[in-house]
Amino acid sequence: MIIVMKNGSTKDQEEQVNRTLKEWNFQIHVIEGVEKKVIAAVGDKRRVDFGFLESLPGVERVVPILAPYKLVAAEAQPERTKVRVGPVEIGGDRLVVMAGPCAVESEEQLLRAAKGVAEAGATFLRGGAFKPRTSPYAFQGLEDEGLAMLARAREVTGLPVVTEAVDLTQVDRVAKWADIIQIGARNMQNFGLLRAVGRTGKPVLLKRGLSATVQEWLMSAEYIMAEGNPHVILCERGIRTFETATRNTLDLSAVALAKTLTHLPILVDPSHGTGKRALVLPMAKAAIMAGADGLMIEVHPEPERALSDGEQSLSIPEFQRLMEEIAPVAELAGKLLARLG
Amino acid sequence: MIIVMKNGSTKDQEEQVNRTLKEWNFQIHVIEGVEKKVIAAVGDKRRVDFGFLESLPGVERVVPILAPYKLVAAEAQPERTKVRVGPVEIGGDRLVVMAGPCAVESEEQLLRAAKGVAEAGATFLRGGAFKPRTSPYAFQGLEDEGLAMLARAREVTGLPVVTEAVDLTQVDRVAKWADIIQIGARNMQNFGLLRAVGRTGKPVLLKRGLSATVQEWLMSAEYIMAEGNPHVILCERGIRTFETATRNTLDLSAVALAKTLTHLPILVDPSHGTGKRALVLPMAKAAIMAGADGLMIEVHPEPERALSDGEQSLSIPEFQRLMEEIAPVAELAGKLLARLG
Amino acid sequence: MIIVMKNGSTKDQEEQVNRTLKEWNFQIHVIEGVEKKVIAAVGDKRRVDFGFLESLPGVERVVPILAPYKLVAAEAQPERTKVRVGPVEIGGDRLVVMAGPCAVESEEQLLRAAKGVAEAGATFLRGGAFKPRTSPYAFQGLEDEGLAMLARAREVTGLPVVTEAVDLTQVDRVAKWADIIQIGARNMQNFGLLRAVGRTGKPVLLKRGLSATVQEWLMSAEYIMAEGNPHVILCERGIRTFETATRNTLDLSAVALAKTLTHLPILVDPSHGTGKRALVLPMAKAAIMAGADGLMIEVHPEPERALSDGEQSLSIPEFQRLMEEIAPVAELAGKLLARLG
Amino acid sequence: MIIVMKNGSTKDQEEQVNRTLKEWNFQIHVIEGVEKKVIAAVGDKRRVDFGFLESLPGVERVVPILAPYKLVAAEAQPERTKVRVGPVEIGGDRLVVMAGPCAVESEEQLLRAAKGVAEAGATFLRGGAFKPRTSPYAFQGLEDEGLAMLARAREVTGLPVVTEAVDLTQVDRVAKWADIIQIGARNMQNFGLLRAVGRTGKPVLLKRGLSATVQEWLMSAEYIMAEGNPHVILCERGIRTFETATRNTLDLSAVALAKTLTHLPILVDPSHGTGKRALVLPMAKAAIMAGADGLMIEVHPEPERALSDGEQSLSIPEFQRLMEEIAPVAELAGKLLARLG
């Protein structure tokens, strides 16, 4: 790391920095600049917390050189990670599509959605049994009953299931019923939850937080991998910015960038990312071109009756059209649409 | 609520909206504008989810009229809430100061900090036993041992203790040892945790999320109050913006605004809000003038040895100076500094 | 528009609002809600400034119903605008590519770039003669000399030229030499400049401001059209968010959204949008799928010697590869690459 | 500056970097880290543009060590700048208050406002003759007539005048009539305008841009000072964030921070900063405590009839109360309220 000293820092202050660095087994190189003095410290610093170096008298700022993540870094393994779930592989040469309702509302609704998306060619069924909602008065999901419905829908359609664990107490149940455990945007830095899903060993889909940098997103993936679970799938779902005309700002550059920083597969959720049904199709195609390994799409048999997020859900015919239209886009991006069976 | 129809929406589409509204027992007023048709719907709509109205064909957008929160609203009670903790009242005519280290690191460190801040006039001891950290490799807190140390520090100094519960599994333990349970910024929308601390009936200090609007912050407080727990204290600690010269952007306008929207007391944390030791004192004073009912300040007996957030922690002499300098500011704002005993 | 009255507003306050509305020839409908009173005002309100209605005693907020723009609105004309420049049409069924160096640095550099991009199939030459730079000490462009070089490059290659007018004093000169006048992101709300380029009648490429909402962007286009100039081309080039891993956050959802709000053509600049050479190609493809009518790409014969923005400029061979790779993407999006002659 | 090489960069790539640095007369220190190689380059680099170093093959990123501004830096002069305007000094031990209407609407309105604020103790009259407005259909100011009215109001009240120059063509006229030329937030990076007001030698009040970092704000001040004009006054007026409950997010930390980075005086505009009349007084007091050298306050004799920004304007009695209430706050901050005569 690089420590930049303030103009006018004293010899004593510099020595205090050097002493601290030596205590931590760093090698030190002092560089006298034209106006500033800079100390370059060489060592393995990932496991140390450097904020307080900045608080030493005479220190202007500290610049880390190494990225703070390790296991998720592109450099950590020569090949891209492929997460296998039953017959489907995420992160390989096939594009996966996870589709289904925002929330499981009833067995009938879920089965209609599941059959519809399966017929249209989706490879995963998505649906929330536990729903994090801004208002305590909004529908919070069918909970365990919803999990059981998802399992039945899997039986009927053959689609593996991805569903969210909202808190620690649900992890075991979700791990038991689901094929992929989803961590929602609001929980991206719920570190206890990350560790818990890490310990299950099950595939985890980690959504990017509303105001999380790409680096923080990768650090949260590192939490899961650090528990010995390599089956991590990232999912961009829009960030919060000043723009209110879309629900969020879908950050596709982050997808293209993250592909260069990590070996993990990356999906995109244009439904939450835009919050507007009319933008789902164009942004789904754009996501594929930006490098996405798959999509997450909200589909409801009757969007106008959805208990949550109806304004961004596709109807089944709309989803069929999406599947038809993205097939050649995927092909152009060098991927075929994944298929079950 | 107001439903704005699209230019060119059809009679049928309008009727579908009206039918839906009537199903929900809304009264309907149709207003023909110069270019647009607008439907005003009168009813108690707080417990309904309105996104899907926007998804109906012909609907351009839906404008809610009522704020989505109820119990926390200024209008819900004539007097401002005062949260009593032992001998101290938060939200009344005294300004409270919660001070102590970011993380409990050792009994010796904590006791030195606790005695120091008590002597300087703090009314609460803060300190983290459980620490949410971006990196899995950073110090995560002493956990239960840390809680016990906080309890001992309370015995020695008489200072009531505020400490964070990072996840659901810790709530009972934190509720047992602490006087106020803190919910951190990253957990502001961890709804299961909010409900759990609501059920303890203990005072809860709810930090604003990094990218939470004031309305979402109040909705999270509503979660706690909806469990029957009226002892909620809000805490502004800086939001995430494009500006990187400060760690966060301390949003004091939100404090002044929230005072008009809710009856709950509001504290300010200028340590996390700015991330820079030199800015803590001016922003502490500014916070009082913006209407804060109290402050949360990081103090470490040896900031340059802190295991976390050393760059924003005050030393004990610096904290003493802060207490001296804020006393007349509080007085000017119509408050005296709260005192123990 | 809708005026929401505060709980507890008085009869007098309501009458003051009504009186004001009547003065402005609005028709009034008063709706008594469960908790709030709402006043719906019907009239042509685009030319009035409504902030002060919100300042009347008893008023909680004012909700406009009509979009504030008129000429640029999709509803204003049945067909999408096509801006014709010499043999090329922007906004029709061809995808245009504007390419060239960030800044004109020398005749030799410009000609090499121009020939390179022409051979690769670009349809416009871009290049800055006037450069707005954050630092007064950075290279500010060759100014008039640069304009003359652009004109010579046009002669040699046949490529029409797009270049920026940074302030009012340059408008006539840029209008004389260039085929399209570019308004940069920092000038999106330089209203005098907008009016001036509007008066030239020349095609104008209007970049979105760093923190401009889509609505503000369209309002700035309205300024140009209000001067009688219908030849406006929008260009998304990334917005400023908390994310610093990319130079800006390229907001492709805004492109898909704006296509539904306006009839004007929209380009995307993935070079400024991402600030990273490696992200230009994937984001160029993504932009086309999001609905862009064209691209703006920085190309430099020797990016490692560029006087500005070298880190995001493609070399000529990289640009050739981009042109080859986007051709089938454009085709899939229903457009052919525009060609000169 | 520090150049961080990529893992796996080659000897050749390193040599290309070194060659480039030597061409620019930098001294080079190569530091072999545990995983990365780092090149420290010592030299006077302010006048060079470093983006393209980042574009060299093998380079991961470049970290500048020196701040890019020079004349405005705190270190550039031992004493804080005091800008003298007639009998008043800005940046000294007196707190200045600039008050008046957002826009000059008529002589009668302006005189009533001017007399009102003068009697209440303001030291400057503010008022816009040229108004930058988002909509081409909104009131754009009385222009030259407005300037003349401001001059008459100055005659009558003795208050020096601050008013905005919106574009280059107005600079001479504004410089002739006004005592301080204001550069608005939307023009903070209108570099031609900055240079032009720099050349007038008149005091300049430079508002922070809506999405400008503190560093960019100081760079814009550097533009003015680089023209030989040291009379620069900074003004924080709120930044754009995701929060929409206030018009902007008033960034008082930036004030406290900027006081440590520059010797220039800093004002705060809580009227635009919050956009809500009820928040002006608390945020005015907070601003003083954060270290502001003065305030800018919108005052209108009849806020409910203002042609712009009425919702944030104080009435004259409200302004009188503000002046009374801030006097002891200023005193506590070690400043007296400035007085004319």
Image (cartoon, coloured by chain):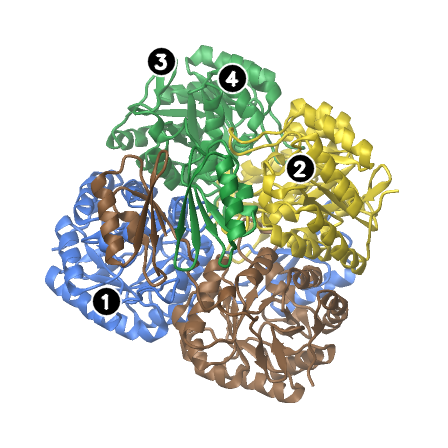
Chain colours: A brown, B blue, C yellow, D green
The disc label shown at residue C220, or none: 2
Secondary element at image label 2: helix
| Foreground of the two, C20 or C329 | C329
Name the residue beneath numbered marker 4.
D199
The disc label shown at residue D87, or none: 3
| Foreground of the two, D127 or C158 | C158
Which of discs 1 and 4 lies nearer the camera? The answer is 4
Secondary element at image label 3: loop
Measured from the top left, where is residue A242 in percent x and y? 54, 48
> Which image quarter is the N terminus of chain C in?
top right
The answer, for residue B314, to whether it is visible in the render is no
Q: Amino acid at mark 1?
A: Ala
Q: Amino acid at mark 4?
A: Arg
For the residues bearing labels 3 and 4, Cβ distance under 8 angstroms: no
Which of discs 3 and 4 lies nearer the camera? The answer is 4
Q: Tag 4 or tag 3, which sits nearer the N-term?
A: 3
Label 2 and label 3 in one chain: no
Q: Separation of disc 1 and disc 2 at Cα?
A: 55 Å
The disc label shown at residue B178, or none: 1
Task: Classify residue D186 by image quadrant.
Answer: top right
Q: Separation of disc 2 and disc 3 at Cα?
A: 41 Å
